[in-house]
Amino acid sequence: EVQLVESGGGLVQPGGSLRLSCAASGFTFSGSWMHWVRQAPGKGLVWVSRINSDGKTTSYADSVKGRFTISRDNAKDTLYLQMNSLRAEDTAVYYCARNTGTVFDYWGQGTLVTVSS
Amino acid sequence: QSALTQPRSVSGSPGQSVTISCTGTSSDVGGYNYVSWYQQHPGKAPKFMIYDVNKRPSGVPDRFSGSKSGNTASLTISGLQAEDEADYYCCSYAGSYTPNWVFGGGTKLTVL
């Protein structure tokens, strides 16, 4: 059974940093492209970032470029999102999702990040 | 790149059909046959219902169907059931330049 389990969310002050993790199991993680998608409270889904299977290519939404870094450790079957210079507008539930072909076919349960003083 | 445009809400009675539209541009919906639809119940993770415009993964009832015309994609749910009440999001590939993927703003489906 495919499972994605996010962790690392919490309350952080504006300007602070946080690292999210997404532990994968039930599939060949090293062969999968992975993404982060966020959802602000009461709002819609927004694509944040993606990383290819070997971790060599990444892409970011303009709103997080230069502040967030996506990475992965295929030996640990884990995806990461390092978030720096956090702003109030980054407050959201962050989901990791597997990308198979042209669809996000598996999602984690999400982890809540709250940026507030 | 702006979010894809969806109606905020739609509603229908059990047994009826509803259609949710998703309007983008020639750079996303109109440019690729890579539109997918996600169902999200409150407090839950999204679940994909349709991919590549009109393909249905195993386990998704055939009451759910997708289509596309120009820059607008649509999700039709026929034979509405109470458990279909949820938020629905469309998503389209938008090319190799960021953002690679764009989502719609979401549509709240209410089963009356």
Image: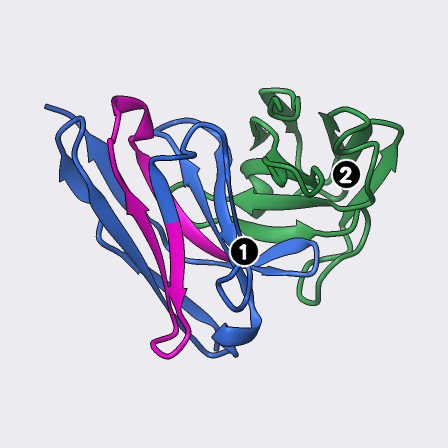
**Element assignment for label 1:** loop
Coordinates of residue A117 in the picture (x, y in percent): 10, 23
Chain B colour? green
How packed mark 1 is, by other alpha carbons closer than 10 Å (few <14, some 14-19, many 20 or more), is few
Q: Is residue A53 left or right of residue A36?
A: right
Q: Is residue B110 left or right of residue A117?
A: right
Q: Which mark is residue A57?
A: 1
How packed mark 2 is, by other alpha carbons closer than 10 Å (few <14, some 14-19, many 20 or more), is some
Coordinates of residue B39 in the picture (x, y in percent): 57, 45
Q: Residue at x 54, y 56 (%)?
A: A57
Q: Which mark is residue B76?
A: 2
Coordinates of residue A14 in the picture (x, y in percent): 17, 26
Amino acid carrying mark 2 in the image: Thr
Task: For the residues labelled 1 and 2, say whether their Cβ atoms are less than 8 Å apart.
Answer: no
Q: Residue at x 61, y 35 (%)?
A: B102
Q: Is A96 in the magenta?
A: yes
Q: As displayed, is residue B75 above or below residue A88?
A: below
**Element assignment for label 2:** strand
Q: Label 1: chain?
A: A
Amino acid carrying mark 1 in the image: Thr
Chain A colour? blue
Q: Label 2: chain?
A: B
Q: Which mark is residue A95?
A: none
Q: Nearer the viewer, residue A115 or A65?
A: A65
* Tag nearer the camera, 1 or 2: 1
Give the total number of marks visible in the rendering: 2
What segment is highlighted magenta in the picture? A70-97
Coordinates of residue A41 in the picture (x, y in percent): 34, 29
Q: Nearer the viewer, residue B100 or B76?
A: B100
As measured in the structure, the alpha-carbon distance from the residue carrying label 1 to the one carrying label 2 is 36 Å
Q: Residue at x 69, y 39 (%)?
A: B92
